[in-house]
Image (tube, coloured by chain):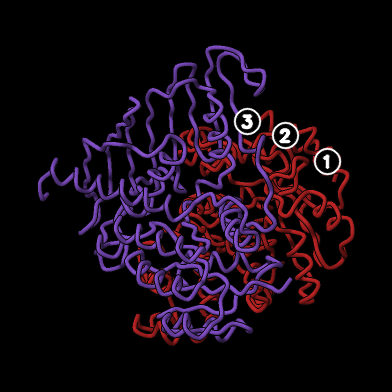
Amino acid sequence: MEKLKIGIIGAGRMGITHMSILGPNPNIKITAISEPSKLIGSLFEKYFSGLTVYSDYNEMIQKEELDGLLLCTPPNLHKSIGLQAIEKGINLFVEKPFTTSYKDAIELAERAECKRLVGQVGYVNRFNDMFLKAKELLKNGIVGEVIRFKTEMFSSTICKPDDGEGWRGKIESGGGCLFEMGSHAIDLVNYLIGIPDKISGSLLNKVYSKNVEDIVSSSFYYNNGIVGTLFVNWCDPTYRKPSNKIEIFGSEGKMLVSQHELKIFLKSLRSDYKLSKGWNTIYITDIFNNVPFYVRGNEFTSQLFHFVDNIIDRSKTNICTFADGANTQRVIEEIRADAKINMGSN
Amino acid sequence: MEKIDKVVFGDNQFFGINHMSQDKAQQLAEKFHDLKSIIDVYEYAFESGINSIMLNSNDRANEITDYFRSNKTKYPDIHWYPSLPYPHKYANLVAEKGIIPAVNEVLFAGNTAGGFLSMITKGSAALLGKDIIKVMQMLIDIEMKAFAGLNLKVIFLQNIISDLLLGLNAKVFFIEFAEYIKKKYNVLPGFLTMNLPLLLEKFKEWELEEVVICSSINKIGYLMSPGIAEYERATSSYDRAKYQIMAMSIMASGAIKADDATGYIKKLNIDSVVFGASSRKNILETSKMLNEIL
């Protein structure tokens, strides 16, 4: 098989990480990157042969014959670059948050669908072995009917006053805690529980950032009666790495899940899943699947190899589609609108 | 190549790092909030006969090394195995500011590297970019300040960085790191990795020799990419005159019991093990078992 040609736009932290993860994949070759920083571009030119470096992504999309593109720019550029790539028939992996508006997300999803391209969004929790296990258990009714959930996400991304100069410091470019971290927590809810029908009680507050929120909270309501709450804080120094947690209370038990462990309390024995009555704990060391190459965690490798595999074999099911990305975008927008009503212009 | 110590005492337990459970990590972080509780645990390690410490250059490293520097007469023979850098410091800075401003901040914040650096202004970052090797050397020196005056044995590059560079096939950075560590610090260069088979294959191809490779090695294959079979093949056939292998995570964050863990290591051609624990009983037992098999 001829190697797939992959390009990367945006050689920041995620762009470089993805480049490394895919580097040893025998089915692909990274042929081009586009990066506006002359400094970073020149380093790639100097140290990496077989790679064409562009400072202008328009030029890269037009000149290169790519099978897949990893879009790792600030989120406000995803729509225009994405549409260009789709028109050229290039399969797309887009970092999260998918876009900066629901409308843009829908447009990208529809265009990619129309062209029958693979479109994947970088919600990496969907590839974490523990959340996959939780999904499987929930699907099989382990905790019975879901009644109530509570999801939390913490990170120590911004732990001192931020001048708001970078793209993460501006809502317009896709920055702020809701876009950056909240999107992961919301996508996890969409994935494990479903897309909420109504949002209420949303609050956004600032701690260190000048222009964007640092803490997000909200309540989700579902037409089937499920109720849940969300809390996201990206300036908590007690967390070394971004951590997602979700607690799900159901008619037959309760489940607490994070990236590394899953605790389940059951009212009765489920021998089909080797789960006893009362408390059960599953650790990541019990269920992990090794990946061919490890850089930042198994899920980061799994999600990119999934993208490549989907390009090679179109009959595979895409775990994180553009439609999934659009659903998260809708919830983000609703939280922001709801918070505005609750808090006025503060 | 100078032989590394067979049993080295690690540091994950002190910094709230547990690959298996956030709750356990939190408990550890609470337990080791003060220096005294950390030193108590080191005392158990010394009692068990260990005299080697691996320590990451995180924000608490200084506190620990300061203690040992000021009590050098009490601990004259400790061998130090620093690992650089503390990746989350850089990850957060990069997330906040972008790659170049982040490097700039580390290099120039208070001119911590001193000396010639005071000659260079922030505006010359572009110049530095042209000589990334020099930047790397300056970053190493900044990270190594915490270990000044200590008896060093190996200086390791953290796995997040070495695996990132491995995926990029960035030969020159591995070569330059190794050369700089040998030349400037006169000790063995080391690389932490979660991809030992590929790293070893690349080192052979690049003829990068006389280095230490430290990797997760345990009987359940946890954090061993691409898999346990490849690890067993790689560790059965490497040239022990050119490479020394140190195993870490032999108990996979507590998933494997110490006797099982050491039983597995015994079957492989491994020179050394780094482990961490926090109770006296676990430290004494594990240390004894490792001394018997290595």
Chain of the residue displaying label 3: B
Residue type at mark 2 is: Ile
A243 on left or right of A309 = left
Q: CB under 8 Å between callouts 2 and 1?
A: yes
What residue is shown with label 3?
B279
Give the total number of marks visible in the rendering. Answer: 3
Residue farthest left in this picture = A344
**Residue B244 image offset from top left, x and y in percent:** 80, 60
A268 on left or right of B50 = left
**Residue B175 image offset from top left, x and y in percent:** 68, 76
What residue is shown with label 1?
B264
Q: Secondary structure at mark 1?
A: helix
Find chain A in the image and tell me its colour. purple
What residue is shown with label 2?
B256
Find chain B in the image and tell me its colour. red
10 Å neighbourhood of mark 3: few (<14), some, or many (≥20)? few
**Residue B25 image offset from top left, x and y in percent:** 52, 37
The answer to whether A250 is drawn above or below residue B273 in the figure is above
Quadrant in the rendering for residue A164: bottom left
User: Nearest the camera: A96 or B38?
Assistant: A96
User: Nearest the camera: A220 or A83?
Assistant: A83
Residue type at mark 3 is: Ser
The residue positioned 22% from the left and 45% from the top of the image is: A204
